[in-house]
Amino acid sequence: MGFFDKLKEQASGVSAQLQDTLKGSKFASQLNTLQNTRKQQASDLGEAVLNMYRAGDLDQAALQAQVQQVFETERQIIATQEQIEAERQAAAEAKLAQQQTRQAMAPAAPAPPQASSAVRTCPNCGAAIEDPNAKFCPGCGKPI
């Protein structure tokens, strides 16, 4: 693979990471907005209950509508959290696939040299020399 091909591949990877980051930021912003909305709705619901209680008239139908709004916002929060998790999973899988592709395309490292397991024999006396690093014959003492 040439220099420009590698550069193009790296630029493509950076672009994909930027897209993922922006998408993640968008979902995080949506989640933050929904959580703030839910807090406000719950606060409004509490104020409504308090005011109705003070007046001695708890209107369950009016409270039911506000409770349903809170529940709907909670469903949206859960859906957004699931989208965020799906995006994270997809990004992790894409990163893993990219790493596997790089590893598959990388040249294989040469295998380390293997020590010969063959037993040598002394040219002088014919004794077996098992130590591959031996400089002298263990049988006759002559240099090998």
Image (cartoon, rainbow, N blue to C red):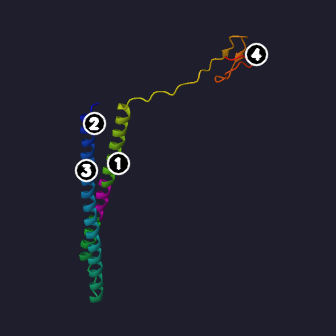
Give the crowd class for mark 2: few <14, some 14-19, many >=20 residues within 10 Å: few
| Range covered by the magenta-colored residues | 74-83
Amino acid residing under circle 1: Gln
Q: Nearer the viewer, mark 4 or mark 1?
A: 4
Residue at 24% across, 38% down: 8
Amino acid residing under circle 3: Leu
102 or 65, nearer to the observer: 102
In this figure, which residue is indicated by the disc labeled 2? 6
Marks 4 and 2, Cα distance to the nearest angstrom? 61 Å
Q: Compare marks 4 and 2 and give the one earlier in the sequence.
A: 2
Q: Position of residue 17 (x, y in %)?
A: 28, 48
Instruction: Name the quarter where the N terminus is drawn.
Output: top left
Q: Nearer the viewer, mark 3 or mark 4?
A: 4
In this figure, which residue is indicated by the disc labeled 1? 89
Residue at 33% across, 39% down: 98
Q: Nearer the viewer, mark 1 or mark 2?
A: 2
11 or 48, nearer to the observer: 11
Q: Nearer the viewer, mark 4 or mark 2?
A: 4
Label at residue 140: 4
Q: Compare marks 2 and 3 and give the one earlier in the sequence.
A: 2
Marks 4 and 1, Cα distance to the nearest angstrom? 69 Å
In this figure, which residue is indicated by the disc labeled 3? 18
Marks 3 and 1, Cα distance to the nearest angstrom? 16 Å
| Magenta run includes residue 125 | no
Marks 3 and 4, Cα distance to the nearest angstrom? 73 Å
Residue at 30% across, 86% down: 53
